[in-house]
Image: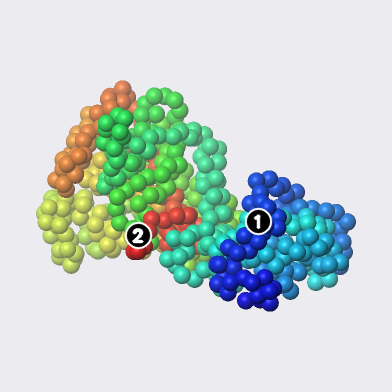
Amino acid sequence: MTDKTQAAGLSSDATEVRSQKLDLLRQQIGDVYPAHFHRTLTNAELAEKYAGLEPDTESGETVTVAGRVFSSRNSGMFMDLHDASGKIQIFSHKDTAPEEARALLPMIDLGDIIGVTGEVRRTKRGELTVNAKEITMLCKSLLPMPEKYHGLADIETRYRKRYLDIMVNEESKLRFQQRSRIVSSLRRFLEDEGFMEVETPMLQPIYGGATAEPFKTHHNTLKLDMYLRIAPELYLKRILVSGLTDKVFEINRNFRNEGVSTRHNPEFTMMECYWAYADYEDVMGLVERMFENLALAVHGKTEFEFGDKQLSFKGPFPRVSMPAAVKDATGIDFLALKSDEEARQAARDAGVEIEKDATWGEVLAFLFEEKVEATLIQPAHVIHFPKDISPFAKEVPGEPRLVERFETYCNGWEIGNAFSELNDPVEQRARMVEQMEQAHARGEKEKTLDEDFLDAMDQGMPPAGGLGIGVDRLIMLLTNSPSIRDIILFPARRQKAD
């Protein structure tokens, strides 16, 4: 407790001191949380405007700045004031600041938000400074800040109280600024490619477009059970049917009632787009241009670090078929295996445990996940997926067990998923019926056919290439973030026990 605090008769408890100061401020100045205050420059604008001001020089110009007090020295004579753009030093001295302004200094704590009007100067040491003439209390902070110079070290607190994390951790602040830049750049890239942005329902009476457990809710007025979307695919395809545009995209929030991990959050961001009169080969080129564009937007180059790896988003990316990749890793030639049982036995012979009723395609995909995924460090397109696990893709000519589908991998992670989209309405219905029956067998009794979507397909959808990009994982790579929780502002967390 400082001498001034003792002299004022304030408590020794830091939080209680702030509350007592608030009471004193209300008595002294009235409104401690004024509605109206206008600064003339942000801190970054101030730094830019006066970049040429020489050391030990006064500008002769008066400005008004505002921000949060991050440090205070010499009983408030020197304060560092931070806004979202940076910091500025505030100098309050009897030679420049009137008594009314200096009288406020003992009431100012770290974390308080204040406004300052004064003359700009640069100190002998080169520090850009505002000589305070007026100080306005804009918001009294009732809780102490985390200690700035050690940051917010506790991981759980960083995720639960993200506002504190961003307040005191410059890396976190930069990461979320970069996230905004990446999403904005992604949107501009697609618009420049001729894609039209749309919005589709988050609340859906029938969930579909992916295989996942949905979140369920109820609409009181409609007396209808509804689901938070797991994917926007079936609505975006309706738009291709409509003829509104030949290139459509949505940057959307999806919800899947599944596990939480360093790469999974139940609420996440996807970009999905559909391109009429294109196929999966065209979409591969789109992905390569997109990744290169985003790397340049964030890093100014296509090469960047992720952990101890040097990644390159410079296209073209290698293309490897899933059967070939598995053959290289295990020696098993899946194209030579004729039945589900042969595939299961080949996996068992390789020492891999397989579900007793797994199909040929499911075994191939499982071995790929187990033996190949983690080796795909640089961006690569894995093509020719099994039809068993790809109900919305067209068959590979001459190989009906495989489809024209690719997934883009980087750092061993799936980042994108794309198809030459199935547009045969009879085949589409057959595959969706099969998918529904499989869901029922897994216990998903509420899974039903989306008859409206199938009606739309009966109207006729042009051939198209479709793409889904996991925006969060892409941001993780571009911002060198090992956990998805680091790039989602408010990730899902367990509630703390009472």
Going 71% across and 52% down the picture, which residue do you hit? 42
Q: Earlier in the sequence, mark 1 or mark 2?
A: 1
* Viewer-nearest of discs 1 and 2: 1
Q: Amino acid at mark 2?
A: Arg
- Name the residue tied to disc 1: 26
Question: In which image quadrant can residue 295 be found?
Answer: bottom right
Q: At 16% across and 59% down in the image, what residue appears?
A: 354
Residue at 47% x, 64% y is 158
Judge from the rendering whether residue 256 lies leftward or rightward of residue 152; answer left or right: left
At numbered mark 1, what does the secondary structure look like: helix, strand or loop? helix
Q: Is residue 272 above or below residue 126?
A: above
Query: Up-down: is 264 above or below 389?
Result: below
Residue 228 in the image: state x and y as whole percent: 33, 41
- Which residue appears at 26% of the width and 36% of the height? 225
Q: Is residue 96 visible in the rendered structure shown here? A: yes
- Report which quarter residue 425 is drawn in: top left
Label annotation for residue 222: none
User: Rounded to the nearest whole Å, what is the CA distance between mark 1 and mark 2?
Assistant: 39 Å
Indicate the quadrant where residue 29 lies.
Answer: bottom right
Residue type at mark 1? Arg
Residue to which mark 2 is pinned: 494
Horizontally, residue 153 falls left or right of residue 418, namely: right
User: CB atoms at circles 1 and 2 under 8 Å apart?
Assistant: no
Left or right side of 198 for 211: left
Examine the rendered structure and indicate whether residue 362 appears above or below residue 121: above
Q: Residues within 10 Å of mark 1 (few under 14, many from 20)?
A: few
